[in-house]
Amino acid sequence: MTGILSMIMAGGEGTRLYPLTMPRAKPAVPFGGGYRIIDFVLNNFVNSDLLQIFVLTQFKSHSLMKHLSQAWRITGLTGRFIDPIPAQMRTGKHWYRGTADAIYQNLDLIESYDPEIVCVFGGDHIYKMDVRQMIAFHREKGAELTVAAIPVPVEQACQLGVIQVDESGKMMGFEEKPQNDPKTIPHRPDHVLASMGNYVFDADTLVNYLQIDAESDASSHDFGKDIIPMLVPGGKVYAYDFSTNDIRGEPETSRGYWRDVGTLDAYYEANMDLISVTPCFDLYNRYWPLRSYHPAVPPAKFVHHDYYRTGHAVNSAVSAGCILSGAFVNRSVLGYRVHIHSHTVIEDSVIMGNTDIGTDCRIKRAILDQEVEVAPGTVIGEDPERDRERFKVSEGGVVVIPKGSRVGF
């Protein structure tokens, strides 16, 4: 599609995902065994044939930049690119002061391409979307701004932007992260209509309102807090119903699937979603391939087959390069090059790459970041008090081991 420029916001610090974000930005956090969080929005644009993409980075961007260079380099195609853009402080000696300021500081990129439409999407959610369908809705309505929206339980309203619409989908009200009495969906008092943080802008409208916002000392320079509330009263602002987005080959159970993996528990549950018998987020749709960087590693290997020592995994996703040497893995997600030694049991866990787990260990409801070594005989996830003395434990009781840790030595 021509005349469309896409800007992915991938500079998030991700403080609620600490310690997974201790060495990296939130969009660079590994997910689902062989992916990074950023891969899902990029796959949405690439599969939608929208290939003029800037990825705006900021905090701890090295890991993200390295991943983009390995997995998402487009060469030899005129006018097609996925370019990472670090914060350049073009408008003063300060970092991005908000989501709107991040785009404002890069207005030169928009002006140089002179697009008709600018897509501004977040880089840290798990979902599939044919973005062309949202753009078609935007054009059909003659909108200045279209916001992707989805119903969510009312208890999540304090973390999201809440939208009110009329029967045509025109936005009649918007409140960013309401702490009390959010406006619920008519006849659905237990749900609100929430912004997904994905915007399709008329390019001239975007530039105009960003310039107005930049001149306001009272503004927090944020799309949700400032730009959208400015546009709603007099502008043509519409909500796009994400549940209507249709992707070939997707099971009906996955329709409307969207996860904000901004907390440790949300991140953990989204990983667990991948390994159910009928997953609500399907990695296996050949009509919607999910690209990422795949290192040069051999196939996964499962060795030993004795009565008390059998290497096997069930209800799990096991990435290439893993060795299950007389170990048992159940309901877990393993990244690249995970070596689990004999008589060890792993259950309900997310184990990232380049990790070595010794013999006779028991690990349950845990997230182990990359390059972790676990000593033989270590037990994690069975004694909450003991776990809290040694590790970060989420509100939902998931034990989180930081990157590069040596546990039990």
Image: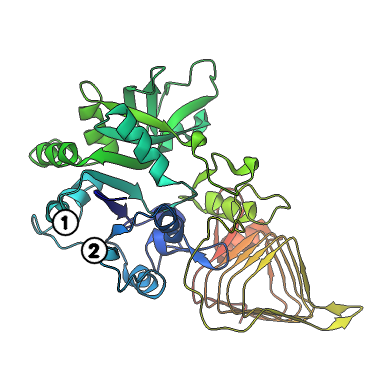
Q: Assign a secondary structure to mark 2.
A: strand
- Would you say 241 lies left or right of 207 here? right
Q: Is residue 256 visible?
A: yes
Residue topped by disc 1: 109
If you read the primary sequence from the N terminus, does the residue marked by circle 1 or circle 2 appear first?
2
> Residue 59 or 284: which is nearer the viewer?
284
* Neighbour tally class for label 1: few under 14, some 14-19, many 20 plus, Cα within 10 Å: some
- Residue 324 place in picture, x, y as percent: 72, 78
**What residue is shown at x 53% (from left), y 69% (from top)?**
369
Q: Is residue 178 visible?
A: no
* Neighbour tally class for label 2: few under 14, some 14-19, many 20 plus, Cα within 10 Å: some
Q: Quadrant of residue 227?
A: top left
Would you place residue 264 above or below residue 133 in this image? below
How far separated are the C-alphas under marks 1 and 2?
Answer: 10 Å
Q: Residue lying furthest right in this view? A: 307
**What residue is shown at x 74% (from left), y 60% (from top)?**
315
**What residue is shown at x 39% (from left), y 20% (from top)?**
168
Q: How is the image coloured?
A: rainbow
Would you place residue 173 above or below residue 267 in this image? above
Question: Which amino acid is tagged 1?
Answer: Leu
Q: Quadrant of residue 66?
A: bottom left
Residue topped by disc 2: 85
- Residue 3 place in picture, x, y as percent: 24, 48
Pick the quarter of the image with the C terminus.
Answer: bottom right
- Residue 6 place in picture, x, y as percent: 29, 52
- Would you say 23 lies left or right of 341 here? left
Would you place residue 323 above or below residue 102 in this image? below
Q: Are marks 1 and 2 in contact (CB under 8 Å)?
A: yes
Q: Assign a secondary structure to mark 1.
A: helix
Question: Which amino acid is tagged 2?
Answer: Ile
- Residue 101 place in picture, x, y as percent: 19, 48
**What residue is shown at x 10% (from left), y 41% (from top)?**
211
